[in-house]
Amino acid sequence: MAKKAVKKKAAKKPAKKKAARKAAKKPKKVIALFPEAAFGPALNSVGIGQALEKLGHKVVFLSDPGFLDVYKGYGFEAHAVNLSEPLPPEEMAKFWVDFINGHIPNFRKSPYDQIDNYVKGCWEMIVETAKWAEKDLPGVLATVKPDVVCVDNVILFPAIKRYARDNDKPWVRIISCSENEIEDPDIPPHLSGLGEKDKEGFARFRKRFNEVIKPIHDNFTEFLKSVGEEKYPLGQFFEASPHMNLLLYPTAVKFKRRHKLPPKQFQYLEGCVRKEVPYKVPKFKKNNDKPLLYVSFGSLGSGDVDLLKRLIVTLGRLPVRALVNVGDYIDQYTDVPPNMHIATWYPQPSVIPQVDAVIHHGGNNSFTECLYFGKPAIIMPYVWDGHDNATRVEETGHGFKLDRYEWTDADMADRIERMLTDKKMKAKLKKTSKAMRSKKGPAKAAKVIDGLLRRKKAA
């Protein structure tokens, strides 16, 4: 019997090789990924791109020039699309750093009070990116000839809709921020940081947002008109794709909507955690047997040096160890406690699985990665969807929201202690992590995109 089984197995090998050769000869589909010029969307799309390549597709990135090297560093082909006046990469990077650092005083304000300054300034620049993209994007799309374009942004690039329409190709919208980027009357407005039951707050925030944003929206409407696109309702700068929309938001924290999102058009990915280089936790001069924390406010949030220095001093007095991401400001840290290690960057998806808890700013990568790996978090938000994620992590029992500045050493020590000892929170995180890992977000995204191409072909 054993010999017959061996013969059967051996007989199948040539057939398998033949199928593999056939698959190799099959023309690859070209999939263009166009993330926003920020590390969160960029690295999420890298995860999706890695999964798409495993399915045999050719993945090409369309990118602001400043992010080309990010994608090339992961081995992808990348094409430049200017989203602003062309500048050398170092000048462009400095522009965004200066923009964020110039708003540090506004980080102390509530999400409502940020509408008049940070939010307004961002939307003014975002509209300009859409105008600039219209100069390069049509030519890049004509060169790349993608079979599907996947865009992760908060604003419409009309050339993508036009290319899809003219060439009978699908386009996909990726929502890498909070799921409330797709509005619903029963969930908090995007960027508001409001709790799910604060319906009066919803109305107040939307009213003020629309008042402030109207001149910017009018400007965008004129641009849409100039390129033959229909205008959007006040406050709206993008639309759901009629083909497919991928939400990175985990279902464990998603909102209860009045209008459910149909699965044929919307799919939750449970995050898109990319593969990253391994990381070995270093030895510490003190507290080597104590719980390990990871602290990061993102590449731009690291400009808030005074806050990070204060946090380092506080953590230096506690029975913990900590890895602290200080970004490009490492030269400003001259007195680091012996239970700390600081660095300009950490391979976050390789670090978080090894720590006991995380303190971060609420960016969607950090938010979803903590949930994916089952790690409790203190979120200290400063702008954009960090406010939404901070509120959501606390009201769903996965961590704590803590004001970025109005806290005491006792507050910090209390939250850390509770993260490390709360059995109910740990059980919830374990359940959420198991559910997210089972879905394999990048692989699911790749499968959905591949299925979209197959349906299009069959039609």
Image (cartoon, rainbow, N blue to C red):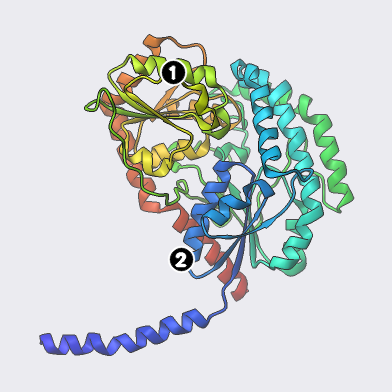
Provide residue 135's location: percent of width, then percent of height: 82, 53
Image position, residue 346 (x, y; %): 44, 39
Residue 54: which disc?
2
Pair 1/2: label in front: 1
Crowd around label 2: few <14 · some 14–19 · many ≥20 (10 Å): few
Give the residue displayed 37% in from the left and 38% down from the top. 352
Which image quadrant: the N terminus?
A: bottom left
Left or right side of 285 for 242: right
Q: Residue at x 58, y 68 (%)?
A: 453
Name the image quarter holding the C terminus: bottom right
Secondary structure found at label 2: helix
The amino acid on which the numbered mark 2 sits, given as a three-letter code, is: Lys
- Residue extending farthest left: 1
Whether residue 362 is visible to the viewer of this picture, yes or no, is: no
- On the image, numbered disc 1 is attached to which residue? 311
Circle count: 2
Q: Is residue 385 above or below residue 137?
A: above
Frontmost residue, 269 versus 120: 120
Amino acid at the residue labelled 1: Leu
Q: Quadrant of residue 237?
A: top right
Residue 290 found in image quarter: top left
**Left/right of residue 109 with respect to residue 123 in the rendered view:** left
The residue nearer to you, when weighing 342 against 197, is 342
